[in-house]
């Protein structure tokens, strides 16, 4: 198996428009949740979201190009640009057929659907936008990255709801391991703070209806009452180790394990016993060749819903056994809400930064668990923890019963 390393990262988030801004926000326990501004939410039960603030794609890419991309694609291309810049990869000096893309979006462009549905009703089918379909479909984030940067290798768009980002990074890792590419641009993107996005999730009763932004996304807390919808993109550059070393790239971390399962249980709820997610973690650790006691930190899926946080806790206990109290656990969603298809990408970046800085952020807003016997993991609370972090696991669980875990390690020669 070829070794795979991380050489670049890019982020668009509710607390920063690049990785440094995002990570500074994380270290300062910044909450990116606020009243919705992208539409009039006065008639909606849910009035808050974790919106990206101050983003204008024209600040990063050409205006003509921007006009042919929906917002989820804009987020992805801008984040990919940052990741590729950090990687130092000169595409013109590489074989473009050895550089691929694995970037997904859970829903694509709800904005394009909403605009054109309105046109259809008010003006008829002949007035639909000619580019409606290629603008809205979820694979266009991946396609636009490939086109914009001239990347001609494997180009895939894994769409698995909230596991999308993690699955794309995992499949990119496998692609490089097995020699189908030397470099992969991978991650997830989402821009779903729209009337139908907020309304749809509210109808499903998965969103917290509070207007108190400090108590809205509180994973593992006894008062948790649903997630907060967020948006953004998390994109990384993965590279075969020898390829990275040959060009003198700075290596940020090494990807060492990936596991994926399905609950085969329910369309929205994780399996109650946590066995599906537990096996994804076990498979990832087996793939990495490590024991549970070697994992320092789990970036939990931790959505702040009753079922997810309870069942994920059970899953971690099953997977880690006697090591469950050793590993630190926190959820980045406590600050940026749930970015759906982009969540796994941002949370992977959080793991890499935790290794780089030797810092694990707290579950912001976690005051008290509902049952200390059930919720007995080492949840980070009150403040972050500074310590040497060598191995991190990122968990993702999604509607449809999808589960994935990916493991990164501090790079050693």
Image (tube, rainbow, N blue to C red):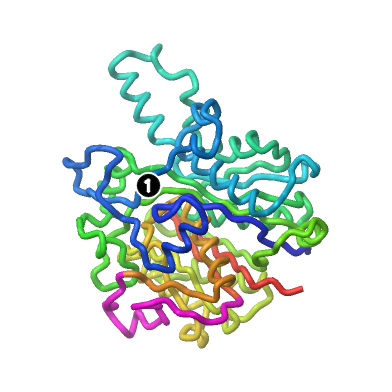
- Residue 305 sits above or below residue 221 on the image: above
Q: Residue at x 58, y 65 (%)?
A: 406
Q: Secondary structure at mark 1?
A: loop
Residue 3 position in % (x across, y down): 75, 64
Front residue of 272/24: it is 24
Residue 307 shows in the view: yes
Q: Residue at x 53, y 55 (%)?
A: 345
Residue 279 shows in the view: no
Residue 55 position in % (x across, y down): 42, 42
Give the residues drawn in magenta, as a range. Answer: 365-390
Query: Is 3 on the left or on the right of 64, as rendered?
Result: right
Query: Is 303 on the left or on the right of 161, as rendered?
Result: left
Query: Is 412 on the left or on the right of 227, as rendered?
Result: right
Q: Residue at x 45, y 68 (%)?
A: 300
Q: Main secondary structure of the magenta part?
A: loop
Q: Quadrant of the C terminus?
A: bottom right
Q: Residue at x 47, y 79 (%)?
A: 328
Front residue of 170/386: it is 386
As for residue 110 lying within the magenta part, the answer is: no
Residue 376's image quarter? bottom left
| Residue at the left extreme, as displayed | 43
Query: Is 348 on the left or on the right of 117, as rendered?
Result: right
Residue 236 position in % (x across, y down): 60, 54
Q: Quadrant of the N terminus?
A: bottom right
| Residue at the bottom extreme, as displayed | 322
Mark 1, Cα crowd under 10 Å, few <14 / some 14-19 / many 20+, is some
- Residue 16 sits above or below residue 223 on the image: above
Residue 260 position in % (x across, y down): 57, 61
Which residue, given by chain and number where applicable, does mark 1 sit on? 53
Residue 370's image quarter? bottom left
Front residue of 301/21: it is 21
């Amino acid at each position: 198996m070829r070794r795979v390393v991380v050489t670049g990262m890019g982020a668009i988030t509710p607390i920063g428009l690049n990785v440094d801004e995002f990570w500074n926000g994380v270290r300062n326990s910044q909450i990116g949740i606020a009243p919705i501004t992208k539409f009039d939410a006065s008639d909606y039960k849910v009035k808050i979201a974790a919106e990206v603030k101050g983003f204008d794609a024209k600040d990063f890419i050409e205006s003509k190009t921007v006009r042919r991309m929906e917002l989820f694609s804009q987020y992805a291309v801008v984040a990919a640009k940052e990741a590729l810049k950090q990687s130092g990869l000169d595409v013109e000096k590489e074989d473009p057929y050895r550089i691929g893309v694995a970037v997904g979006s859970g829903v694509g462009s709800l904005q394009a659907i909403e605009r054109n549905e309105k046109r259809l009703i008010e003006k008829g089918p002949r007035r639909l936008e000619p580019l409606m379909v290629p603008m809205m479909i979820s694979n266009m984030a991946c396609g636009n990255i490939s086109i914009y940067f001239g990347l001609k290798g494997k180009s895939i768009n894994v769409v698995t709801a909230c596991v999308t980002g993690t699955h794309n990074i995992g499949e990119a890792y496998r692609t490089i391991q097995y020699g189908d590419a030397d470099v992969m641009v991978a991650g997830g993107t989402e821009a779903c703070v729209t009337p139908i996005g907020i309304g749809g999730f509210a109808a499903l009763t998965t969103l917290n209806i509070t207007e108190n932004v400090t108590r809205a996304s509180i994973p593992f807390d006894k008062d948790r009452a649903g997630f907060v919808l967020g948006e953004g993109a998390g994109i990384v550059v993965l590279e075969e180790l020898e390829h990275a070393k040959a060009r003198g790239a700075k290596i940020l971390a090494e990807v060492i394990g990936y596991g994926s399962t399905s609950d085969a249980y329910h369309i929205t709820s994780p399996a109650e016993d946590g066995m599906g997610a537990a096996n994804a973690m076990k498979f990832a650790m087996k793939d990495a060749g490590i024991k549970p006691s070697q994992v320092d930190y789990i970036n939990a899926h931790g959505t702040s819903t009753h079922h997810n946080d309870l069942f994920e806790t059970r899953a971690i206990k099953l997977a880690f056994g006697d090591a469950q109290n050793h590993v630190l656990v926190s959820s980045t969603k406590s600050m940026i809400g749930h970015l759906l298809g982009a969540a796994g990408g941002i949370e992977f970046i959080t793991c890499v930064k935790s290794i780089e800085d030797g810092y694990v952020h707290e579950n912001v807003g976690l005051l008290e668990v509902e049952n200390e016997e059930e919720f007995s993991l080492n949840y980070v609370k009150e403040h972050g923890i500074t310590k040497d972090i060598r191995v991190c696991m990122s968990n993702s669980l999604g509607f449809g019963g999808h589960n994935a875990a990916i493991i990164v390690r501090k790079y050693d020669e």
